[in-house]
Image (spheres, helix red, strand yellow):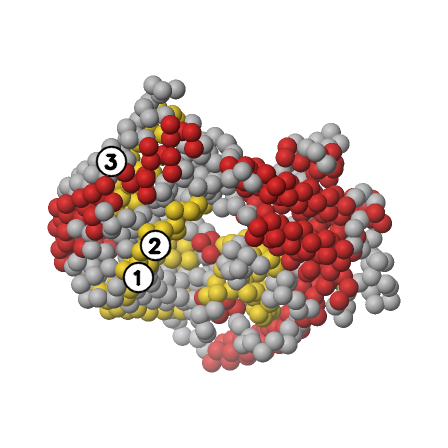
Amino acid sequence: MSKLTNLSIHENHFIGGIPPFIGNISSLVTLSMADCYLGGNIPDSLGRLRSLRFLGLGGNNLFGKIPLSIYNLSMLSAFSLADNQLEGNLPRDIGLALPHLTHFQIWGNHFSGQVPVTLSNASKLKTVEVSENSFSGKVTVPFGHLQYLQKLALSENHLGSGEADEMNFITSLANCSKLEYLVLDVNQFQGRLPESIANLSSQLKIILFGWNNLFGDIPSGLGNLVNLELLRLNTNQFTEVGKLRNLGRLDVSGNRLSGEIPSSLSDCVSLETLYLDRNHFQGSIPQSLSSLRGIRKFGLSFNNLSGKIPQYIENLALEYLNLSFNDFEGEIPTKGVFKNASAVFVQGNTKLCGGIVELGLPTCRIKATKKRELSHVHIITIVISLLGVIIVSTFLLCWTKRKKRKQSSGFSLEEPFTQLSYRSLLKATNGFSSANLIGKGSFGSVYKGVLEEDGTNVAVKVLDLQHRGASKSFMAECEVLKNIRHRNLVKIITSCSSIDFQENNFKALVYEFMPNGSLENWLHSSAKETNDGQSRVQSLSLLQRINIAIDVASALDHLHYNCSKPMVHCDLKPSNVLLDNDMTAHVGDFGLAKLISESKIPNQSSSIGVRGTIGYIAPEYGMGSEVSIHGDLYSYGILVLEMITGKRPTDSLFEEGLNLHTYARMALPDQITEIVDPKLVQEAEVSIVNRQRSRIDIIMDCLASIIKIGVACSMELPQDRMLMSTVVKDLDLIKKTLERNQANN
């Protein structure tokens, strides 16, 4: 191997870390091991590869600091360590030490400190991507020295100093004539955008400045950037829009823009996407915007706009139009985008009428013209008839509303929290927007929302009352949640049982928002896309999985034995296990839950039909047996096995009599490495690199013990299943063993 120059083994599933002996292959020019899930540290020995020009180690779950010897590889042109867990500060002299760099990619790590000034000494740089780290402070790099720079991505850090001139580094970028991407969003930048932004490269395609604290006017000189396709300035504090010509996409939502919508926007004849939502615009939609013939997405929601909806809008090429929560009035057009109810949003405009039937708006009044004089007799007859109709209609309407209210009264959750109206929830979720949708279940959909009253993040579960059993699900969940409190159960804030704007029954439950989503997503989502189009793999460590298993077991044990009214969950599965900021698990969705009759002891059952989700339903339910706590035990056992194997019970592997329970049981005790989630095996194999054989043996013992618990809980006969109180104790012992092992190593 002494003459080997190119070692490219990326996108594999190796385990055991980066072999230190690679540092002995002194002839290497290219080392590409990206996306191999290697784990471990970067060996110091790689610093001996003095001929190396390409180093690609991204997507490997590498941790620790970059060895200083790596910065001695002065011939490097490509330095890619993105999407790992590396930490520490970058050397101050990095640009001097690596003068031939063309690509510098370290996004998606835990690097901190300032972005080194000397980075500009690597004058051949084309790509600088340091997003998704913890860099902070003022950006002082004179990027203008990088005449070949094409992409600068600093997003999702803590950059910003609060100084008045902290955005002046943009001025130096005017020398970067090849710049195409400028990504600075999700930082702490403050102040005004300098007018010099107009002098940036005419090659610029994307500018992302959203989610900062920028204010003042949006420089009109941005219109000089003739190739600009996307300008995202949302969630800042801008107060005026300047002229922006030749622009494809403009997002200035969530600022403090006020006054009338600038007529200068009509100059943006190439505009396809325009988001002006959540500002303070007033007046009517200007007639001048009729020149935007290519516009496809147009958002004006949550402003103070008024007047009639211009007729010309139906002639535009729109695929999405959001006019909700303004003060528009009059008749809605019926052509163009207005023919598609799923593409038009007009909620919260109480003076609108007409439109297609699917929009559910009232019919517009038609002013009748007198064609002849009616006799007094005719007038009296008509008036009396109308009065009769009105009286009867009023009686029927009151009776119907009373009936609806009676049916909709539901349960009082007896929480000291403001009762929320349908309108409040509509506004909190941006009109139950698909962008806010975070989950969908048998009986309804769950939306993320922000309560206007105090800015609280919430999850709003809206019941689909057209679905058979949805109302019963709502009642069941209210009954359960008013009777129980536990740290591992999802906390309900309030409920809403009301009538929507179309006089239809509306039922919703408002929960505490869980920012880390569901266990389902963590187990089965291989990667998530970041703002700059990259992807990051998310996974749970063994200790995290054990903690989640303990949390869920504690919740079920509380439900079964410690409630004033014991109950069965009936639908335990990963999507119903939610994770908070600290990765603590909370069991949710009690729509199928059933109280255990007080006349029966907990081990007995309460009669209802088959309940739950395929793969997690206890086998006895399929044979007509009554619901009992043993059904929850079975579901829990399957959930535990899924957490350790990474396989759903409905995986295509399981057919012809093989199921997840049998699959796991057959692997005990000596073949568990063949069924365990590869990410957990990788975590264990890191110990081999560090010559910690005792540690890997303990990890494997812990995995085997957890699999035994999953198997014991999912036995075919109900009476053979392990009790939840025993599960909690056994898992706690496993956790302590693992923690001791980690502390000793």
Q: Which residue is mark 1?
A: 188
Instruction: Between residue 668 and residue 42, name the one nearer to us.
Output: 42
Q: Secondary structure at mark 2?
A: strand
Q: Is residue 324 above or below residue 494?
A: above
Tag 2: Cα neighbours inside 10 Å, few (<14), some, or many (≥20)?
Answer: some
Q: Position of residue 370 (x, y in %)?
A: 38, 71
**Circle nearer the viewer, 1 or 2:** 2
In this rendering, position of residue 211 left or right of residue 197: right
Q: Position of residue 686 (x, y in %)?
A: 52, 39
The answer to which quarter of the image holds residue 307 is bottom left
Residue at image location 43% in from the left, 66% down from the top: 348
Amino acid type for the residue under numbered disc 1 = Gln
Tag 1: Cα neighbours inside 10 Å, few (<14), some, or many (≥20)?
Answer: many
First in sequence: mark 1 or mark 3? 3
Residue 74: assigned label: 3
First in sequence: mark 1 or mark 2? 2
Tag 3: Cα neighbours inside 10 Å, few (<14), some, or many (≥20)?
Answer: many
